[in-house]
Image: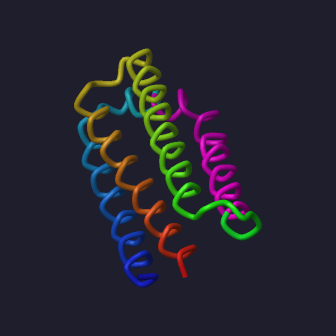
Amino acid sequence: MKMSGYILWMLSIIISKIINERGYRTISNAEKVRLMDGFSTTRAYSLIPLVVLICIFYLLVEKSNLDRSTINIGYFTLLVVYIVVRTLTSQQKMKALEIPMTYRKYYTLSQVIAILGVTWFLFTFLQG
C-alpha cells in the first residue's frame, strides 16, 4: 500500500508539472509577468493550511482514541474544502489579473492532481 502512495505521488507531481507547463505556454509574456507578480504572496503562504491539516491528521491518528474512519472522513472532507477554496480564490485572482480562461483550466487541473497525489501518499503512509 505504501508503495502505491510513493508511485502515485511522484506521478502526480510529474503530471501536474506537465499540465501546468502546457497551460503556461498558452499565455503571453506580459500575462506571465502579471501572473508571477499577482501570486507572489499566495505562493508564500498557500501551503500553510495544508500543512496544519496534515499535522492535525497525524496527531489525531497517533495520539487520540478517535475512530480511524471518523478521522479519515474529517480529514478528507477538510481536504476537499481546502482544494475548493484554493481553486476558487486562485480563479478569482487570475480573473482579476485578466489571465485567459485556457490557462486557468490547465492551472486548476494541475493543482487538483498534485494535491490528490500528496493526499494519497499521506493516506497510504499513515495507514501502515
Of the 4 image quadrants, the one containing the C terminus is bottom right
Residue 34 percent coordinates (x, y): 46, 26
Q: Residue visible at 77% across and 67% down?
A: 63
Majority secondary structure in the magenta region: helix
Residue 118 percent coordinates (x, y): 47, 62
Rendered view: 103 above or below 12 = above
- Is residue 50 a member of the stretch shown in magenta? yes
Q: Residue visible at 55% across and 30% down?
A: 37
Residue 75 percent coordinates (x, y): 55, 51
Say which of 127 and 48 sits in front: 127
Compared across the picture, whether 56 is left or right of 93 comes to right
Residue 91 percent coordinates (x, y): 40, 26
Q: Residue visible at 57% across and 64% down?
A: 68
Compared across the picture, whether 72 is left or right of 105 comes to right
Rendered view: 66 above or below 53 = below
Task: Tell me the colour scheme of the image.
Answer: rainbow
The magenta-colored residue range is: 35-60
Rendered view: 104 above or below 67 = above
Say which of 49 and 93 sits in front: 49
Say which of 67 and 30 sits in front: 67
Of the 4 image quadrants, the one containing the N terminus is bottom left
Rendered view: 85 above or below 7 = above
Q: Residue visible at 73% across and 62% down?
A: 59
How many labels, in total? 0
- Is residue 124 a member of the stretch shown in magenta? no
Compared across the picture, whether 28 is left or right of 86 comes to left
